[in-house]
Amino acid sequence: QSVLTQPPSASGTPGQRVTISCSGSSSNIGTNNVNWFLQLPGTAPKLLIYGTNLRPSGVPDRFSGSKSGSSASLAISGLQSEDEADYYCAARDDSLDGVVFGGGTKLTVL
Amino acid sequence: EVQVLESGGGLVQPGGSLRLSCAASGFTFSSYAMSWVRQAPGQGLEWVSTISGNGYRTYYADSVKGRFTISRDNSRNTVYLQMNSLRAEDTAVYYCAKNSGDFDYWGQGTLVTVSS
């Protein structure tokens, strides 16, 4: 059971906009920044969003992050087939004095 | 170019020990925290441990506290994870990652299998 809660799956068609939610608590998302990672099958995770809404160099602006209270969201606009992957949210948890991840969301492009 | 390369994984019996190494390059190693994150087969990501840039502060997940020890040698640009009293549930790919939380560079991972 992950500390942060994500839907196990999400889907969309090419060109569509999809959002993935990440629910936490006051000790993690409510107080700290949220980071999002993308993992393609058989590969290492890759940083997608850091500081809740910042994109590392090279990440398309189709990807955006936001936060409200103790919940965060990742939005992907102009969905492409190569976006099909597992997505994870993460945040520091002050009560646990460490980093917590969501269980991951498998995104399918129909 | 930033590179992170793990080594040391393998098959170990329950109760055994293993030491993972992570060699990094392409950035000022001593200025950054380094972390270990693991992924059990078919499962999600789990943060394991983080060490500060100067090595003075260490943090552990409850699931490994008291059994795993993280350390670093800034002269060798290397971080280590000493794993003792290994259990079947420690079986996973172990990733080394730069930073703490906003893991911006990851290694390719090293597989640790705990089985008799």
Image (tube, grey):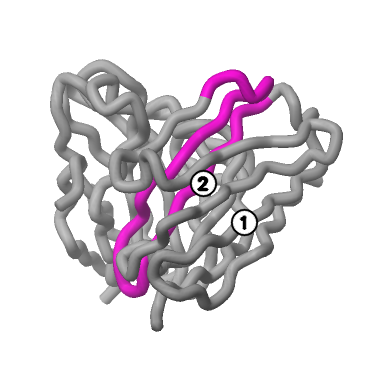
x and y percent of residue A101 in the render? 30, 44
Please report the bounds of the magenta region as a residue range: B32-57
**Element at label 1:** strand
Please give the name of the residue rendered at 37% of the width and 46% of the height, measured from the top-left corner. B64
Residue A75 visible to an observer of this rendering: no
Quadrant containing the C terminus of chain B is bottom left
- Foreground residue among A30 and B41: B41
Q: Amino acid at mark 2?
A: Trp
**Residue A26 lies in what quarter of the image?**
top left
Residue drawn at (45%, 33%) of the image: B101
Position of residue A81 measured from the top left corner of the image (x, y, whole percent): 41, 71
* Residue on which the image places disc 2: B36
Whether A60 is drawn above or below B29: the answer is below
Q: Kindly identify the residue that appears in the image at 81 percent across and 46 percent down.
A: B1
Q: Earlier in the sequence, mark 2 or mark 1?
A: 1
- Label 2 residue SS: strand
Residue contact between numbered discs 2 and 1, judged by CB atoms under 8 Å: yes
Q: Which residue is mark 1?
A: B20
